[in-house]
Image (tube, rainbow, N blue to C red):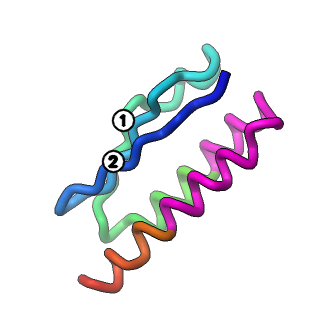
Amino acid sequence: MHMISRLIITRNAVMIIPMKVITMKAITMKAIIMMPIAMAAKGIRMMSIIIRDVTMLMPRKSILMKATITAMRGIVAPLLQNN
């Protein structure tokens, strides 16, 4: 079982919505995480920590998680530059 996240970018916030929740421990992670664009860098660091904790439960999927973080960085960085 793995989690597929959908990244939605609104004008003011970046929303990460997990499509599936992995295990009961992972449910402690909020279903929807919203972060202002201005705080996106801090938000990504927090997400990295959350994702790292989750990947400890499922090491095989860590590549997927890393790809998610990389995708987030790739999407968020241009937004920060535009402002």
Residue 4 at x, y percent in the picture = 53, 35
Residue 32 at x, y percent in the picture = 36, 35
At 61% from the left edge and 14% from the top edge, which residue is drawn?
Answer: 24
The local secondary structure at tag 2 comes to: strand
At 31% from the left edge and 71% from the top edge, which residue is drawn?
Answer: 38
Q: Is residue 64 magenta?
A: yes
Tell me the amino acid under the disc marked 2. Answer: Met
Q: CA distance from mark 2 to mark 1?
A: 7 Å
Tell me the amino acid under the disc marked 1. Answer: Ile
The local secondary structure at tag 1 comes to: loop
- Please tell me the numbered disc located at residue 32: 1
Q: Which residue is mark 2?
A: 15
Mark closest to the chain's N terminus, 2 or 1: 2
Relative to 29, residue 6 above or below? below
Taking depth in this image into account, of 1 and 15 the one nearest to the observer is 1
Residue that extends furthest to the left in the rendered view of this protein = 11
Q: Which residues are magenta?
A: 49-73
